[in-house]
Amino acid sequence: MDVDKIVRGIFLDLDKALSQEQMKASLQRLEEDFYEKVREAIRLYENSPEGDKREANTRKYMLKKLIDLRSTKIIAAVLRGENVEDRLTKEEKELYNNIKALIEDFKRRVLEEKKKEISLCTITSDLPEPIVDITGRVLVLNKGDVLAISSEIASLFEKAGIGRRMG
């Protein structure tokens, strides 16, 4: 079988895949090496004597459109908790697993109550102006005052040179 027939067959597969993804709401099955075959077909076509730059660019555009459509469906499937790995290419499986892990990590971080560490901090110099805490209280801080504050705020006080952690 000559290269031109193989390339044309793969281009037809690309046409069919793009058409199906555009017409159907659900993610359609692609062979694991689908993108690899299409990339190689485009490369062969560009380097062949019959190759047409406009046709090659059209195929690249179609491939990008297919990737965009499928990526959107993959993200939606992850959010719905739907397992679609049996319909994905090898590149898409990696994308699916990465997105799934990112979303699971994001949910865990948002839903998990983070316990704040409390530090004792000694004020090392008088503050020229009062400060307001998160409850709205006005605090006048003088050298030698001791505060129980979050470790994050204690670090800021140390960096600003107005406080030092105790212990």
Image (cartoon, helix red, strand yellow):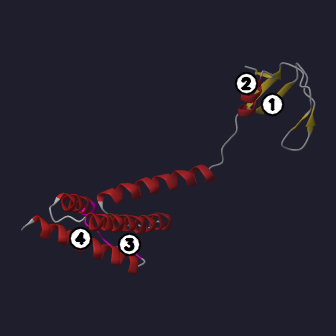
Task: Identify the mark nearer the N-term, 1 or 3.
Answer: 3
Task: Identify the mark nearer the N-term, 4 or 3.
Answer: 4
Task: Identify the mark nearer the N-term, 3 or 2.
Answer: 3
Q: Secondary structure at mark 1?
A: strand
Image x and y of residue 129, in percent: 92, 30
Q: Secondary structure at mark 3?
A: loop
Neighbor class of circle 3 (other Cα within 10 Å; few <14, some 14-19, many 20+) is: many
Q: Closer to the camera: disc 1 or disc 4? A: 4
Is 115 placed left or right of 36 in the picture? right
39 or 81: nearer the viewer: 39
Neighbor class of circle 4 (other Cα within 10 Å; few <14, some 14-19, many 20+) is: some
Image: magenta residue range: 26-35
Identify residue for label 3. 27
Q: CA distance from mark 1 to mark 4?
A: 68 Å
Mark number for residue 11?
A: 4
Query: Magenta: predominant secondary structure element?
Result: loop
Quarter residue 8 falls in: bottom left
Query: Label 2 amino acid?
Result: Lys
Quarter residue 120 falls in: top right
Tell me whether the residue at label 1 lies in contact with that at label 4, contact meaning CB atoms closer than 8 angstroms. no
Is 43 placed left or right of 63 in the picture? left
Identify residue for label 1. 148
Q: Secondary structure at mark 4?
A: helix
Task: Identify the mark nearer the N-term, 2 or 1.
Answer: 1
